[in-house]
Image (cartoon, rainbow, N blue to C red):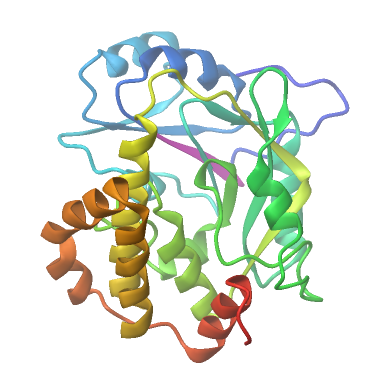
């Protein structure tokens, strides 16, 4: 793993594990894995590009978890079960935590007992542009709770999140229904429903160099609408579900495609239905700009 300057702390190996889920991005992984400053569990979602052999040869210290089929984001939950540490940091195959910031994030979590999840600042590309979502999080209309280290959230970006394992496991981690992309919402809602806090913390940083091997924008948008509908079916009232359907239809082809892609998983979503409590719904209304 990358050597740290003397003034940059490395988290003890017993504190945090980095969980990376990947599929067919061997070259991205070979570039990003050496940058992680904690033990890594790599979940391979049935790659066909010899990822496992290449990583096993170049990075024998990485724990490999090969899956027979693409589990999407649920692969992170399977990887987390291998971690055995009180904190879990998530990274994509094209992202990594800034030097010293895993240790800093662990210290923040330890100092705030109700805090389940920290979303770090995200710097994109070699030019280190601030991801626009970070400005939105920093200006969260939910404000900053007195027992949290930054603005309160009801969502997060998985590749920039570190979580308390106890909280992650208690709400089931990333589920096998939503998969990817848009997998974060259901987990965030369940953490909030259980009384945990989520916060944006600008003092810790994740670098994200988007892989050239990415889905086409329309296909990704369709995937997001699929996830929104399935999450709504699992956690939101009927009126909100109808609103998601209407929004998808107004979006046009990507939204309609997303609804169609969601249909095979609707029964599984309904079996997992557990609407969030009124206080979480009120926070969602605030985020939507409605009267709480």
Q: Residue at x 24, y 74 (%)?
A: 272
Q: Position of residue 47 (x, y in %)?
A: 24, 24
Most frequent secondary structure within the magenta stretch:
strand
Q: Residue 13 or 287: which is nearer the viewer?
A: 287
Question: Which quarter shows the C terminus?
Answer: bottom right
Residue farthest along the right direction in this orientation: 7
Judged left or right of residue 25, residue 210 is right
Q: Is residue 68 above or below residue 15?
A: above
Q: Residue 50 or 53: which is nearer the viewer?
A: 50
Query: Which quadrant of the structure image shows residue 264?
Result: bottom left
Asked if residue 18 is among those painted magenta in the image, a careful observer would answer yes
Judged left or right of residue 288, residue 149 is right
Does residue 113 show up?
yes
Does residue 14 show up?
no
Magenta stretch?
Answer: 14-21
Judged left or right of residue 34, residue 184 is left
Q: Is residue 166 above or below residue 7?
A: below
Q: Residue 210 or 79: which is nearer the viewer?
A: 210
Q: Residue at x 25, y 14 (%)?
A: 49
């Amino acid at each position: 793993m990358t050597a740290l300057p003397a003034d940059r702390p490395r988290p003890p190996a017993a504190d945090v594990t980095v969980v990376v889920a990947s599929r067919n991005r061997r070259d991205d992984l070979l570039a990003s894995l050496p940058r992680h400053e904690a033990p890594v569990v790599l979940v391979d979602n049935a790659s066909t590009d010899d990822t496992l052999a290449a990583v096993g040869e170049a990075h024998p210290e990485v724990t490999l978890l090969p899956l027979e089929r693409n589990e999407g984001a649920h692969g992170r939950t399977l990887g987390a079960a291998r971690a055995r540490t009180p904190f879990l940091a998530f990274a994509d195959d094209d992202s990594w935590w800034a030097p010293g910031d895993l240790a800093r994030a662990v210290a923040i979590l330890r100092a705030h007992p109700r805090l389940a999840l920290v979303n770090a600042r995200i710097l994109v590309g070699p030019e280190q542009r601030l991801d626009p979502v970070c400005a939105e999080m920093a200006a969260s209309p939910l404000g900053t709770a007195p027992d949290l280290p930054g603005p309160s959230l009801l969502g997060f970006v998985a590749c920039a999140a570190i979580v308390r394992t106890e909280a992650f496991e208690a709400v089931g981690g990333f589920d096998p229904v939503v998969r990817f992309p848009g997998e974060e919402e259901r987990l965030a809602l369940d953490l909030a429903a259980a009384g945990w806090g989520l916060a944006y913390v600008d003092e810790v940083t994740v670098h994200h160099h988007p892989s050239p091997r990415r889905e086409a924008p329309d296909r990704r948008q369709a995937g997001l609408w699929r996830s929104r509908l399935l999450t709504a079916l699992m956690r939101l009232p009927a009126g909100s579900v109808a609103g998601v359907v209407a929004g998808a239809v107004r979006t046009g082809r990507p939204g309609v495609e997303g609804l169609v892609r969601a249909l095979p998983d609707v029964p599984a979503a309904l079996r997992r239905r557990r609407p969030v409590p009124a206080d979480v719904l009120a926070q969602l209304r605030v985020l939507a700009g409605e009267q709480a």
